[in-house]
Amino acid sequence: MIVEIQGVDFINKGGELMTHAIVQHVASLPGNNIVAAHLRMGNFQQRAKTGLHHLSWVYYEKAPWVGSVIDGFSRFIPKPLLNSLKITTNSQIYAVLDASGFTYGDQQGARMIEIMANRTKRWKKEGKKLILLPQAFGPFQKKAVKEAFLEILKNADFVFARDPVSYHYLMELECSQSKIKIAPDFTNLVKGEIPPYFQSNSRQGCIVPNYRMIQRTSSAEKENYLSFLTFCTKYLIKKGIEPFALIHETNRDYELALQLQSEVGVAIKIIQEPNPLYIKGILGNCFIVIGSRFHSLVSTLSQGVPCMGTGWSHKYQMLFEDYNCSDSLVSPIDSPDKISNLLDKLIEEPSRSELIAGINAGATEQKKRSTQMWRDVDHFLGF
């Protein structure tokens, strides 16, 4: 079986971690099973390093015919050469797995949803199966967003909402509700790796900044976000914890980390790690994490590490509820007393051990649910 992966890239480390999760799972199934990605998803080296095959297709909206031209040309290449180069043609794709994360909703706008709707029409016409893997959805108040997403729902075979709020938004739509299920973020099943350069010790605190906290929050939260990170970092130092910043996605996150360095007045270490498995390994070996990137928080909580989170959408609240630590999600405009009191609970005993026990119980349950999600997908695909 050959499946195509959609909705992820090599810029967002959360998306790349989802890619690893899909590749690992598909490879574990009986037989010779392959995950392929189109030619505009990274480059040949990035795809090969992640275990992906190269789909002889590009999605180029200004000239949609380019994909079929490239795919048609590949048919003239001898099959043994295609196999040796790990190139897959469009006709070989049996199913499409969409792991977009958070694309379908009013906050993202209609353009990408309309683009995906057009792709799903083609996949349906070609007889391909389409599964939307666990992700956040909604709301769908904007007419163009709603109409485009309804087209996607019509063409999809299975849709997994990542949380009850997303599920509720889907239930409000006029669609076949039998194809919609709830399952958590499935990267909780991926095992992290500790990079050789990372020296783990018992008192390291990781700060994961997110520039979207400045883009997508209220004016008060936006203005206070850097001050919030600064306060937390200084508090960790006061408590004898060595802080460092971990960049989970973009250059703008790195710029925030540099600003944090300046505000703290201490040359805290900044780690820019391109390998998402190493990133997860680092997060799993910290004493405490203060993060705003969704998948950094999934990676932290799924490994039983106490953390304080901030977020800009409902997906953050749902995540912390799943891991039995909803009080650990805060706002940048919360009072210093509230923040310091929570940090004390995460750092000091006996509250720390009690929190860890609750997080681990949540992690066990969420991993069971992710395993069941894959069973449902596998059964549908014929395994």
Image: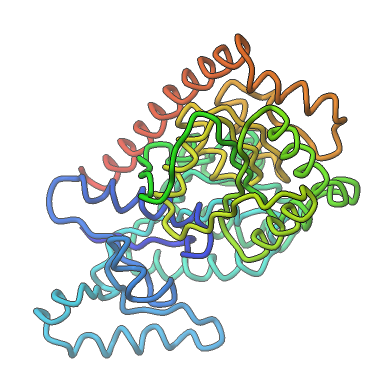
Please state which of residues 273 and 172 is positioned toward the viewer in this rendering.
Answer: 273
Residue in front for this viewpoint, 214 or 158: 214
In this rendered view, identify the residue nearer to me: 191 or 369.
191
- Residue closest to the eye, 49 or 138: 49
Spot occupied by residue 33 in the image (x, y as percentages of width and height): 19, 56
Residue 228: percent from left, percent from top: 80, 41
Q: In this view, does 70 lie above or below 340?
A: below
Q: In this view, does 186 lie to the left or right of 33?
A: right
Residue in the picture at 30% in, 83% down: 71
Residue at the left extreme, as displayed: 80
Where does the C terminus fall, quadrant-wise? top left
Residue 217 % position (x, y): 81, 49
Residue at left offset 43%, top offset 40%: 186
Residue at the spot 86% in from the left edge and 48% down from the top edge: 218
Instruction: Please determine whether, in this image, residue 61 is positioned above or below residue 107.
Output: below
Res 169 quadrant in image: top right
Q: Describe residue 239's horizontal placement relative to residue 10 as left or right.
A: right
Q: In which quarter of the image is residue 316?
A: top right
Residue farthest toward the top in the current orientation of the protein = 350
